[in-house]
Amino acid sequence: MTKPILYGADYSVYVRIARMALEEKGIDYELVPLDIFAADGIPAWYLEHHPFGRIPAFEHDGFRLYETGAIARYVDEAFDGPALQPKDPRARATMNQIIGMLDAYAYRAMVWDVAVERLEKAEPDEALITGGLSQASTALQALSSLKASGPWLLGDQLTLADLHAAPIIAYFVKVAEGQKLLARFADIRDWYARVIERPSFVHTEKVG
């Protein structure tokens, strides 16, 4: 069996989600660097892997996938290693609800409207940041309300929901506003402190 290939950049939240799934399963994979924001633009060859020119894309034994959720689920189901999805249908539905909620309501607010705006703009749009923080607060409240008792979001089993949430929140807490808001949700703050100690999180940390 050939080594799986993941195309993308180490700065990407969604590439990191896929990488964490691979790491949790103990899979040896190749990360092919691809910067979709490079001055030269998106290479034409990459559009054969992802017609919309986003990252990540994935390849395994000639089988190609794009969309992070599909990649993570394939990785969990196609390879040996600890299960990253609950067997119970209600728990699995909650896992998928958390992932969908994060994609739809948390990612843009936390990453782009707050963290990127604060960190990378010479003159940040304060109104955009304020709106992003309001949306982030709602998302964290929703995450707190969905969290089961136990160390992980679904209880005792680490799942794809944890791997999806961690990189998004990691970007959010790069800024003081994100750290302050996270501290208001003690259960999510404590969960985050646990998940960032996992080798899958540590090994996928962007260097530099």
Image (tube, rainbow, N blue to C red):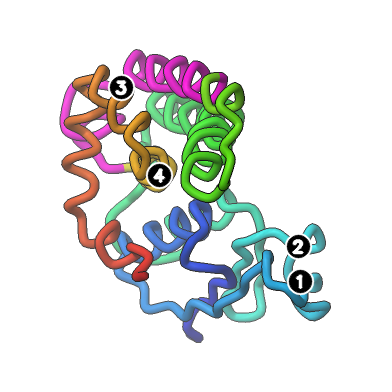
Quadrant placement of the C terminus: bottom left
User: For residue 139: magenta?
Assistant: yes
Give the camera-side residue of 143 and 90.
143
Q: 75 above or below 33?
A: above
Asked whether the beta carbons under mark 1 and mark 4 sit within 8 Å of each other, the answer is: no
Q: For residue 82, which quarter of the picture?
A: bottom left
* Amino acid tagged 1: Ile
CA separation in Å, label 1 and label 4 = 29 Å
To which residue does mark 3 refer? 147
* Disc on the earlier residue, 2 or 1: 1
* Amino acid tagged 3: Lys
Q: Secondary structure at mark 1?
A: loop
Q: Residues within 10 Å of mark 1 (few under 14, many from 20)?
A: some
* Disc on the earlier residue, 1 or 3: 1
CA separation in Å, label 2 and label 3 = 34 Å
Q: Secondary structure at mark 2?
A: loop
Asked whether the beta carbons under mark 2 and mark 1 sit within 8 Å of each other, the answer is: yes
CA separation in Å, label 4 and label 2 = 24 Å
Magenta residues, as a range? 131-158
Q: Is residue 88 left or right of residue 32?
A: left
To which residue does mark 4 refer? 160
CA separation in Å, label 2 and label 1 = 7 Å
Question: Where's residue 19, x and y in %?
Answer: 42, 63
Residue at horizontal 55 percent and vertical 77 percent from the top:
33
To which residue does mark 2 refer? 53
Residue at horizontal 29 percent and vertical 32 percent from the top:
179
Disc nearest the viewer among 2 and 3: 2
Disc nearest the viewer among 1 and 4: 1
Taking the image as drawn, is residue 174 in sight?
A: yes
- The numbered mark at residue 42 is 1
